[in-house]
Image (spheres, grey):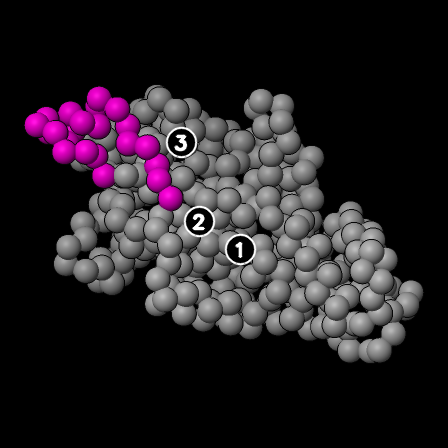
Amino acid sequence: MFKFFRKKAPPAMAPTSGLAQQAQAPAAPVAAPAPVQAGQASRAGWLQRLTQGLRKTGASMATVFTGTRIDEDLYEELEAALLQADAGVKATQHLLTELRRRVREHKTGDPAQVKALLAQALTELLLPLQQPLTIGEQQPTVIMVVGVNGVGKTTSIGKLTRHLADSGQTVLLAAADTFRAAAREQLAAWAQRNDAAASPADTRIDIVSQEGADPGAVCFDAVTAGRARGKDVVVVDTAGRLPTQLHLMEELKKIKRVTAKALSGAPHEVLLVIDGNTGQNALAQVRAFDEALGLSGLVVTKLDGTAKGGVLAAIALWGRERKGADGQTRAVPVYFIGVGEQLQDLETFDASEFAQAMLG
């Protein structure tokens, strides 16, 4: 179930204390063990929920391949379906060019096989987005979560916290959305839900909050507390804002700087939460927040019932042009996607699964 999720290895036994061991050398991250059959069954159930969630996105594309002929009319219908799914002009042209090439190479005229070739082309385009969220290279790993108003940041943090706890990580939440009414209470409610779902052996989820305080000060205190308490992960919730609100974007930059003062190298992850229903607007948000903060990953929410799931193809194609600090082209991975409000409705992104669900 969490095969793309990495966690730190437990420290080796030694006569020194655990804190001393961490100070001597950080534990190297290791891949999580292969999922058991129960996990495979859960993943299969997740694929069903994802397919159901993307049914509006895939419905128009599924009808394209119900005929018996492969001709220009089919390609035109497919182009319209991809654009309707908000894949965008560039990603649509890329996929159609790839599909035509693959059809020529395989010399096929079977619509079912052509659909399978499109699924392969889409999977290949999305594959750079399928990367693991690394936990354990730093102690604690600090994750800063940003996004516009109403995309589900706090809800996604609650679900992400459940993933972390299930993987054996101890978590501290920083309620840095200090001005929205009931923001702290909402975060606390998710922490309580996670505590209720946890086994008795799990460590309770801590929260650092200050009503009406400066968000940067809350983050500084949270990271400091996370270090002192030996937490594995500190997750920072921030206030929602539009990328056009320049003064609020500057505040996010300040939060990032203050976090780095509390712990060198922090935040180690800057995650943008985007609403899958917003289509091409989501791509615009990714561009703007990446320019301001340097994104390390995405969480895509509200894919249940959306007709615009194709935006991930547009994001993937944009990622081919994005360059990191070293000048190398580097995509912004999609760590998680969500299809509902329950704790189990947020899962790791799999390119092949998403391609299958998107094509119906």
Going from the N terminus, do you reach mark 2 or mark 1 first?
2
Farthest-out residue, front:
106
Q: Quadrant of the N terminus?
A: bottom left
- From the image, tell me which residue sits under label 1: 350
Q: Say which amino acid is labelled 2.
A: Phe
Image position, residue 239 (x, y; %): 43, 43
Q: Residue at x 40, y 31 (%)?
A: 267
Q: Say which amino acid is labelled 3.
A: Pro
Q: Residue at x 69, y 73 (%)?
A: 59
Q: CA distance from mark 2 to mark 1?
A: 9 Å
Residue 267 — which label? 3
Q: Residue at x 51, y 41 (%)?
A: 297
Q: Say which amino acid is labelled 1.
A: Asp
**Badge 2 element:** loop
Image position, residue 80 (x, y; %): 81, 63
Mark 2 touching mark 1, by CB under 8 A?
yes
In this rendering, does residue 294 appear at all?
yes
Name the quadrant containing residue 323: top right
**Badge 3 element:** loop
Q: Nearer the viewer, mark 3 or mark 1?
A: 1
What span is in magenta?
A: 10-31
Residue 18 lies within the magenta run: yes
- From the image, tell me which residue sits under label 2: 4
Residue 20 lies within the magenta run: yes
**Badge 1 element:** loop
Looking at the picture, tell me which residue is in the foreground, 189 or 235.
235
Image position, residue 170 (x, y; %): 24, 44
Q: CA distance from mark 3 to mark 2?
A: 21 Å
